[in-house]
Image: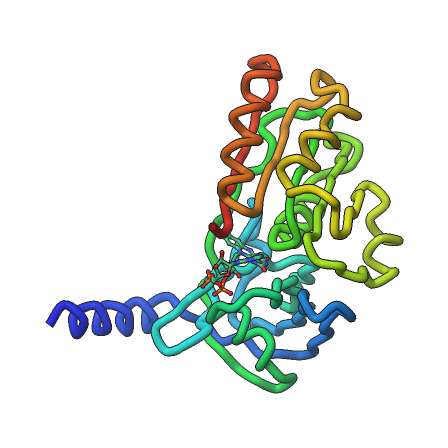
Amino acid sequence: MANIIKRAAFKLMEKTLAQHANVVAISPWNSGSMCEIDLHLPTVDMSKWTTIPRLKCKVDEFEYRDYTPTWWEEEKRICTLYVKTGNNGPGSRWAKRLQPGDEFLVSPAHAAPLPPKPGKILGLADGSALGHMLGLKQLTDPEEHPLEVGIIFQEDDQLPMTLSRQNPEFEFMAKPQRSSLESFQNWLHTKKLSDYSSIYIAGYSPMVRELRKQLKSSTDQNTTIYGHGFWR
Ligand SMILES: Cc1cc2nc3c(=O)[nH]c(=O)nc-3n(C[C@H](O)[C@H](O)[C@H](O)COP(=O)(O)OP(=O)(O)OC[C@H]3O[C@@H](n4cnc5c(N)ncnc54)[C@H](O)[C@@H]3O)c2cc1C
C-alpha cells in the first residue's frame, strides 16, 4: 500500500514539476568515467538561473538524480552536464545509455547561493562537482570574485584539452596517490586562507563534511564556507 501511495505521489510530482530535455550530443571522456552531455531544454527559462542550479533528471522509472547544468546559453536554451559514469548506480548507468536524440524529464531547482560579498573565492571539488564549480564561474564576475578551484579526479581521467585551456583558474588533479580528503588537505597548505572571502566545497559527502569542519576552525569569521555533499 505504502508503495502504491509513493508511486502515485511520484507521478503527481512528475506531472507538475517535470519538463522535457532533449539530448543534443554526448562526449564520453577517454577514461570512460565521465560523460559530457549537451542538452536542449525548450521550456526552461535559464535567465532565472541566478544561483548555482541543478537539474533533477529522471534516470529510471522511479529514480531521479541531480546533475549540474553548465555553459548554458539562455537564448538557445542549451546547456552541458558533466556526469560521472565510473560507478554502479542508476544515474551512472543512465548516462552511459543516453544517445543523441533521446528525450527525458528534468526538473530545474536551486543548488547553492552565490557569494554574499566581493572577494576571492576558493573552490574544492571532486569530479561530480565539476559542473557546480563551472556554474559558479559562469554566474560570478571575475573582477569582483577572482576564482581559484581545485578539482580532484580519483580516476585517471584524461581531460579534454579545451577544458583546461578555457579554465586557467582551475587546477585539475587526476588520480592522486592519496584520498581526495588528504590531497585537498595538502593542497590547502599552498593557499593563504585569509585571502579568500568565500570557500565552496562540493562532492563526496564525508570529504565535504570534514574539510568544512577543518576550514571553519582555521579561517576567520569573515570567510563564508559552503559545503554541499553530492554522494556518499
Ligand atoms: C545538487 C547536486 C548536484 C549534483 N551534480 C552532479 C553532476 O553535475 N555530476 C555528477 O556526476 N554528479 C552530480 N551529483 C551527484 C548525483 O546526483 C548522483 O548522486 C551520482 O551521480 C551518483 O548517482 P548514481 O545513481 O550513479 O549512484 P548511487 O546509486 O547514488 O550510488 C551507487 C554507488 O556509487 C558510488 N558513487 C556515487 N557517486 C559516485 C562518484 N561520483 N564517484 C565514485 N563513486 C560514486 C556510491 O558510493 C555507491 O556505492 C549531484 C548531486 C547533487 C545533490
Give the left or right position of residue 46, taking residue 17 as reference. right
Relative to the observer, which residue lies in front, 165 or 146? Answer: 165
Quadrant position of residue 149: top right
- Compared with 16, 142 (above or below) is above
- Among all residues in the image, which is located at the extreme bottom? 101
Q: Which residue occupies the extreme top position in the image? A: 220
Picture residue at 63% right of the left edge, 30% below the top: 199
Image coordinates of residue 96 in percent, x first then y, are 60, 77
Q: Quadrant of the N terminus?
A: bottom left
In the displayed structure, 168 sits above or below 70; it is above
Q: Position of residue 18 (x, y in %)?
A: 41, 70
Colouring method of the image: rainbow
Question: Which residue shows up at 78% across the image and 47% down it?
Answer: 172
Q: Residue drawn at (77%, 47%), measured in percent from left and top?
A: 173
Q: Residue furthest left?
A: 1
In this rendering, the answer to whether 176 lies above or below 187 is below
Residue 196 in the image, given as x and y percentages of width and height:
70, 23
Total tally of numbered discs in the picture: 0
Seen at 70% across and 20% down, the residue is: 193
Where residue 89 appears, as percent x and y from the top left, is 48, 68
User: Is residue 219 rendered to the left or right of residue 171?
Assistant: left
Nearer to the camera, 63 or 92: 92
